[in-house]
Image (spheres, rainbow, N blue to C red):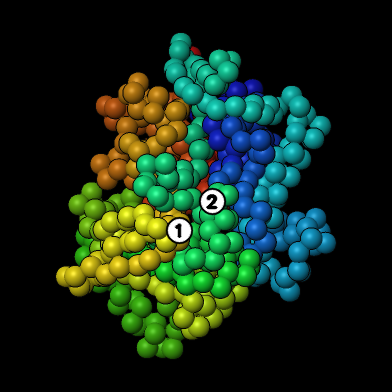
Amino acid sequence: MTAAPGKHIIIVGGGASGVLMACHLLRDPRDNCVVTLIERRERVGPGLAFSTDRPEHLLNVRAANMSAFPDDPLHFWHWLSEAAASRFEPCPDPYCFAPRHLYGEYMSQLIAQERAGPDGQDRLTIVRGECRTIEERAGRVVATIDDGTTHLGQVAILATGNEAYDWQQADRHVSPWTAEATRAAEIGKPILILGTGLSMVDYVLTLLQKGFAGPIHALSRRGLLPRVHRDASPVRFDKEDIPFGASGASLLRWFRARLADHERQDGDWRGVVDGVRPFSQEIWWKLSSRSKARLLEHARAHWDVHRHRMAPQADRQLQNAMASGQLRILSGRMLSCEAGEHGLSVSYRPRGQPDPEMLSVGSIIDCRGITGDPFLSTNPVLQSLLRQGLARVDALRIGIDVSADHAVLDASGAASRRLFAIGPLTRAAFWETVAIPDIREQCTRLARQIGLLSVAA
């Protein structure tokens, strides 16, 4: 294939995934493609993940691994040291955990710099609005915005990122990032948090920062907390060491054996987890559907808390709150909730116990995070593609089906030549697609591929 300069690429989504994709396309000197970036939020860059304005919400990855560009690994650290140093407590080295809102600013500045470049106005257009539909017409893609305007291109890339849980469907549950959740902190009555993951960590840190002194109950099915980051060098695995294509059970046995071997040598389990990470997408890709389903059911929660860890500063505050008795971590299932004169009476069944227990709380804050099931998505462009048969939901309902090179598969399983996807939407194919290090690698590969792609009608 030969390069086809001047291609018009439409990117749907202006959060971190979309900005990274745009930057990788525009900085490739071999291709002078034109990019239209469509984003419904006022600010381009932060998206859902980095839109917080709370300084206590920290990145869960060290600054040294948050660069937008794999070939410039300290790019974000240098930006922190220069552009943002006056507005937050400096980190002593690139291995710090910076406030998350600063990464949103970093993304915004990256895209602003692309527009300010010598040909930025000609090569990058930012459209503020919600993309309602994408259609294929006469060898082109047509994106329609909520105001009725249309944009014509040769390739469209879905970069819509994570989608928050629809709290409107949950009885008496409140999003942690609403005014009502803020009032809950100010009232001081006991709070029940649903979920014990990183979203719960953020909300608890905000409660503590605001001086909340009441009881906090955090409930999830297994009651697992994210583990904390520690300094640990990744174990070096060769590709030949990895049991690609093994069953889920065999894979778990292999992984546990590696953990045991490493710990017998006084190694840290984090080194094994981080050593496997470069192979995780290929491991997932080569698993059978049955093995994937079993791993999701039996190993996902444990993998997530070890893989997606929290900053040491956050862990210290949580440990102090638990040691004082203010924060209780509960495992079990919520059964019912009834409003009474003095608040909410919640019934839940503790894990492994036959009889329910009761909690009396003032508020229920839903920190179960994101939804991965496209059938439950409220994203209009995704629903439009599914209705048209231009995309299909994977068998496990954790994303849409894409090929190994990120092409969206239609209802018949055929790979599109014009429609691609990156980021969390592709978790069904690659699994590890939610962290910036994984997304930037996707963007690097796809930008290179599109630079060589022939999209002639």
Mark 2: which amino acid?
Glu
In the image as oriented, which residue stretches furthest toward the front? Answer: 341
Specify whether 166 is left or right of 348.
right
Mark 1: which amino acid?
Ser
x then y, percent, for residue 400? 36, 38
x then y, percent, for residue 196? 42, 65
* Residue 363 badge: 1
For the point 42% across and 78% down, which residue is it?
269
The residue where tag 2 is placed is 180
Mark pair 2, 1: CA separation? 9 Å
In the image as oriented, which residue stretches furthest toward the top? Answer: 138
x then y, percent, for residue 137? 45, 13
Label 2 element class: helix
Quadrant for residue 97, please give it: bottom right
Mark 2 touching mark 1, by CB under 8 A? yes
For the point 44% across and 28% down, which residue is it?
380
Label 1 element class: strand
Quadrant for residue 118, please give it: top right
Query: Badge 1, how many Cα within 10 Å: few under 14, some, many 20+?
Result: many
Query: Badge 2, how many Cα within 10 Å: few under 14, some, many 20+?
Result: some
Name the one closer to the observer, 189 or 23.
189
Specify whether 414 is left or right of 168.
left
Specify whether 344 is left or right of 317.
left
Say whether residue 347 is visible: yes
